[in-house]
Image (cartoon, rainbow, N blue to C red):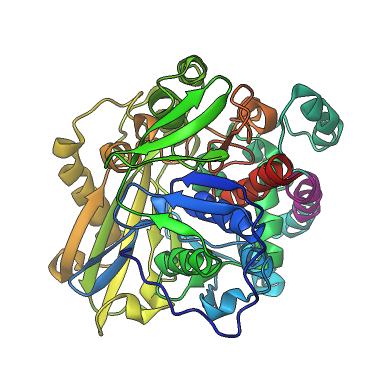
Amino acid sequence: MNIETSDRDPFAAPAPLPTGKTACVIGAGFGGIALAIRLQSAGIATTLVEGRDKPGGRAYFWEREGFTFDAGPTVITDPDCLRELWALSGHDMAADVELMPVMPFYRLNWPDGTYFDYSNDEERLFAEIAQLNPADVAGYQRFLDYSAGVYEEGYVKLGHVPFLDFKSMIKAAPALAKKQAWRSVYSMVSSFVENEKLREALSFHTLLVGGNPMKTSAIYALIHKLEKDGGVWWAKGGTNRLIAGMMRHFERLGGVVRMADPVVQIHTFGSRASEIETASGWRERFDAVASNADIMHSYRDLLSGSGRGKGYARTLGRKKFSPSLFVVHFGIEGTWPGIPHHMILFGPRYKGLLEDIYDHGVLPQDFSIYLHHPTVTDPAMAPEGMSTFYALVPVAHMGKLAIDWDGIGPILEKRILDEIERRLIPDIHSRIVTKFHYAPSDFSADLNAHMGSAFSLEPILTQSAWFRGHNRDDVLENFYLVGAGTHPGAGIPGVVGSAKATARLMVEDLVA
């Protein structure tokens, strides 16, 4: 093992009673670890296999010259869905992870100099809205009522329920139709507020899970209710410390971890997954197998020896995948108390920029930047007197934008830093201590992400619930999915919710 673990807690609850059943979870991303914890908590002897040198998947991290750089995600919402993973066995997440509140949730900035701080402090938020358009305060309150309604239907009732057949989709359809799920988030927001900047402020959230605000179902407006009730949080030490805490808890329960040994084949026999084989030559038989790997990689590559793998890979090839990301990580001299933890630096276009990324597959001259500044909340993420940042720009995936990222990367990196210099940090280039970027080609190479997609299948209505990868495969009766490619989708609450849905199926199948 090469990750940090703590000594066993002498006051910990007793280990779960063994069921005699075994399971393997492929991939130690958020979804995979959450599933492994749930299975181990249910007494199913679980082995977690990870190909990289560190766990986390998209929540990987790097340490360079005293700076800690989280790959992401950086926004933690619905912390209760995480606390539940510890509570299953009578433990407390706070013993392993310290969550710190982030306020404001986001500061939004437009090229004309307008700023807007978004939070769940109603008095301050209403004042921010009134500065843009006083008439939109009442509209925003009506939007929150709508958000609460879709949160109840889309998250509370359906977020942890596996959609295994079309009948389950039909059963959910009336409630979703009542909430006008066929409309886009942007369209629904626009029906409540008039100011264009406020429309952008209330619709950009879908980009954090790979969705185009102009096309993603209005059900995703539930994010506002999620944030309003649960807040936005940061794990002290970085998202990587949340991952480390989850891994520590899994091992505390008796779970087995196999690191730096990628799975190369899921062997099948008839309609069952029979054995796991890794690059080192290790092979093991399990009663059930779940994959937190990229959904296309799982079927096309890991199940390449089965007809099911080849057939479903062809089906997946006809689906729409989310865009990728270009991320610049940089550590700089100085501290910046005036720059909040999360900022959105909008570009001059919104709808047109989204069309370029999602539809046209071009690399536009303009861009919007998601700026992450963790040291304003957690100074230990950088050496004393210095700051850690990352700047994230959505870009088309490699299936639409086939360019040489080795050549284009340094050029785009400079353009992004130049824009931050122009709008926020005048002498940024002279202050940089260390920097590097992460491109779509890196998502593809490091994470086996199909076409370098950062969020798996695009979260449009026709690729949601039953239309997404199923939590339990339709043909291989003991093969399951967890993570962004299955229901309910990307984001920490999404993949942790997928773990809850998948674990319920696996426990019922194995223990019942």
Q: As displayed, is residue 359 above or below residue 512?
A: above
Q: As displayed, is residue 441 above or below residue 258?
A: above
Q: Position of residue 363 (x, y in %)?
A: 30, 32
The verdict on residue 152 being magenta is yes
Magenta-highlighted residues:
144-157
- Residue lying at 40% horizontally and 29% vertically, measured from the top left: 302
Taking the image as shown, residue 11 lies to the left or right of residue 387, namely right
Quarter assignment of residue 358: top left
Q: Position of residue 76 (x, y in %)?
A: 54, 63
- Residue lying at 22% horizontally and 71% vertically, measured from the top left: 332
Q: Position of residue 400 (x, y in %)?
A: 35, 24
The verdict on residue 266 being magenta is no
**Residue farthest to the front?**
20
Looking at the figure, which quarter contains the C terminus? top right
Q: Position of residue 8 (x, y in %)?
A: 49, 79
- Residue lying at 60% horizontally and 85% vertically, measured from the top left: 11
